[in-house]
Amino acid sequence: MFWFLVIGLIAGWLAGKLVGGRGFGLIGDLVVGVIGSYIGGYLFNVLNLSIYGTIGEIIMATIGAIVLLLIIRIIK
């Protein structure tokens, strides 16, 4: 559970930097990253892609978080 939160925090921070140009604070980055990890896992499963290791999980969660932030940006 701890690693899941750490990976979510890193992914949320990276996605915030890549999409918004800034982070969203500790809680905001954590929420974006955790939700993004679920989205990334779903997308990778649908596309039948495999990913291994901690770096792979961070990449997958970051991609999911970027998708989440882009969807939020479109809705706004």
Image (cartoon, rainbow, N blue to C red):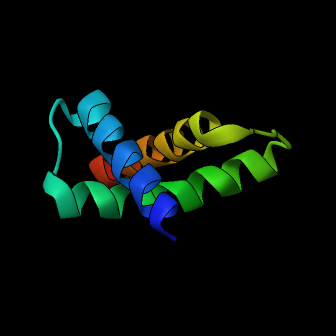
Callout count: 0
Image location of residue 21, percent across then percent down? 17, 29
Image location of residue 75, percent across then percent down? 31, 56
Q: Is residue 70 visible?
A: no
Query: Image height check: is 67 above or below 20?
Result: below
Q: Is residue 45 left or right of residue 66?
A: right
Query: Image height check: is 56 above or below 3?
Result: above
Kindly give the residue lying farthest to the front in the view shown: 2
Query: Image height check: is 39 above or below 66?
Result: below
Q: Is residue 69 left or right of residue 37?
A: left
Quarter residue 35 falls in: bottom left
The structure residue drawn at horizontal position 36% and vertical position 44%, both measured from the top left corner, is 10
Q: Is residue 14 left or right of residue 43?
A: left
Q: Is residue 35 left or right of residue 18?
A: right
The structure residue drawn at horizontal position 73% and vertical position 45%, both measured from the top left corner, is 44
Image location of residue 28, percent across then percent down? 22, 60
Which image quarter holds the C terminus?
bottom left
Kindly give the residue lying farthest to the right in the view shown: 48
Q: Is residue 53 visible?
A: yes
The structure residue drawn at horizontal position 47% and vertical position 55%, both measured from the top left corner, is 36
The structure residue drawn at horizontal position 17% and vertical position 42%, both measured from the top left corner, is 23
Q: Looking at the image, which is closer to me, 26 or 47?
A: 26
Quarter residue 41 falls in: bottom right
